Image (cartoon, grey):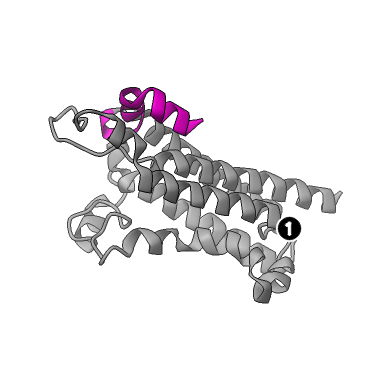
Amino acid sequence: MFIALELSFPRFTARLLLPEQFGGIIEHASNVLVLLDAVLWAAVVFACRRERRGPLLLALAATAYLVFATMEELDWGRVWNLNLGHELVARLAWGRVNFHDARWGGLAAPLVFAPAIAFFAASLIPSLRDRWARLAPVSATRVEALAFMATLGLMFVLETARITAHRLPTPPTLPNGIAYRPSPVPFCQCQFYVLFALVALRVWRDVRRTEG
């Protein structure tokens, strides 16, 4: 669907993919979704309070990571005109207001995203599969992991193709006049955050069913 949108309406797609400070709808949707994820996983921690130590710790780790991801998406408050630490982050990240945009030899974004990949990929690695399964119901299932990997693959394909950028006769410009290349990454981030929400709802349901 997104590829069809890029091919048919590249200029409209470019507007959708604007940075959030310039009114980009998809970026704002991504911010709301990751905040919802943090809330849902906090509810999962509460639901798992009587679970074994392993699943509870994994739920706590997932919640902490999503709180961190929320702060990263919001540029530590700057997106919503709040000071939630973006000045400190800017000092630590060479002037950037988040860590995933820091210039650490191109490794910043992969390092920030690595915990999410590990959470889903563990159930697909033979040497880890059985150990990961013992953290059920909090650990990701094989189907959830495959959905995550498919979305990750789609992100790399879309980011490499940059269909919208190539379909436009001239590079689009931001409202401040600076040219930019629309990236499909925010669209894929929304899919990742929807998947995290679905996993949280599945875990909450499984825990409640066990208690019942």
- Residue 18 is one of the magenta-drawn residues: yes
The answer to whether residue 103 is visible is: yes
Image spot of residue 126 (x, y percent): 68, 73
Percent coordinates x, y for residue 10 in the rendering: 34, 27
The extreme right residue here reads 212
> Which residue is the extreme one toward the bottom?
127
Q: Between residues 194 and 68, which one lies in front from this camera angle? A: 194
Residue segment shown in magenta: 1-22
Residue 148 in the image: above or below residue 105: above
The foreground one among 55 and 176 is 176
Q: Mark 1: which secondary structure?
A: loop
Q: Quick check: 85 left or right of 49?
A: left
Residue visible at 37% across and 46% down? 159
Q: Residue pushed farthest left?
A: 177
Observer-nearest of 172 and 130: 172
| 104 lies above or below 195 | below
Q: Confirm whether the magenta stretch covers residue 9.
A: yes
The local crowd at label 1, few if under 14, some if 14 to 19, many if 20 or more residues have their Cα within 10 Å, is many
Measuring 66% from the left and 76% from the top, which residue is drawn there? Answer: 127
Residue position marked by numbered label 1 in the rendering: 137
Image vertical order of residue 192 relative to residue 14, above or below: below
What secondary structure is the stretch in magenta mostly built from? helix
Residue type (three-letter) at the residue carrying disc 1: Pro
Q: Is residue 16 left or right of residue 151?
A: left
